[in-house]
Image (cartoon, rainbow, N blue to C red):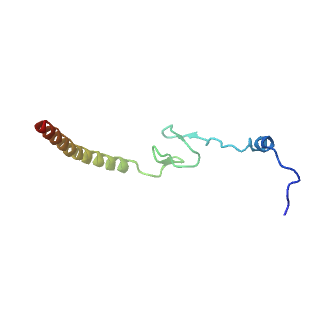
């Protein structure tokens, strides 16, 4: 097995490693909506790739609306329990 003849100093090793660095991803503007996306990939905002609609985003928006409608019902129940806790604290004082 090969063994180095001399120890490499900390400075020498660090000077060699200065070129090991992370580069930022390239981005391109989507021709349909203008959003910055990575090249050769479907646009996450509009769902277009090479001028064709690959994914339908309208169905995703509808499911989000349904989730938002359910959320306020849960919060009203939480508010009711908070109000009852406040009234019980006042009654005990």
Considering every residue shown, the one lying at the far bottom of the view is 1
Estimate the x, y position of residue 88 in percent, counting from the top left: 13, 41
Considering every residue shown, the one lying at the far left of the view is 91
Estimate the x, y position of residue 35 in percent, counting from the top left: 50, 38
Total number of numbered discs in the rendering: 0
Q: Is residue 12 left or right of residue 38?
A: right
Q: Residue at x 71, y 45 (%)?
A: 20
Please say if 2 is above or below 84.
below
Estimate the x, y position of residue 3 in percent, counting from the top left: 85, 58
Q: Is residue 73 left or right of residue 22?
A: left
The image quadrant that residue 78 belongs to is top left
Considering every residue shown, the one lying at the far right of the view is 5
Q: Quadrant of the C terminus?
A: top left
Q: Quadrant of the N terminus?
A: bottom right
Estimate the x, y position of residue 12 in percent, counting from the top left: 81, 42
Q: Residue at x 35, y 46 (%)?
A: 61
Between 71 and 90, the one nearer to me in the picture: 90
């Amino acid at each position: 097995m090969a063994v180095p003849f001399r120890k490499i100093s900390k400075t020498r090793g660090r000077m060699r490693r200065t070129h090991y660095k992370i580069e930022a991803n390239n981005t391109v503007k989507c021709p349909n909506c203008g959003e910055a996306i990575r090249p050769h990939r479907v646009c996450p905002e509009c769902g277009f790739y090479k001028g064709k609609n690959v994914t339908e985003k309208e169905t995703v928006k509808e499911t989000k609306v349904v989730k938002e409608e359910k959320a306020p019902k849960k919060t009203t129940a939480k508010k009711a329990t908070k109000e009852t806790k406040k009234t019980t604290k006042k009654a005990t004082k």
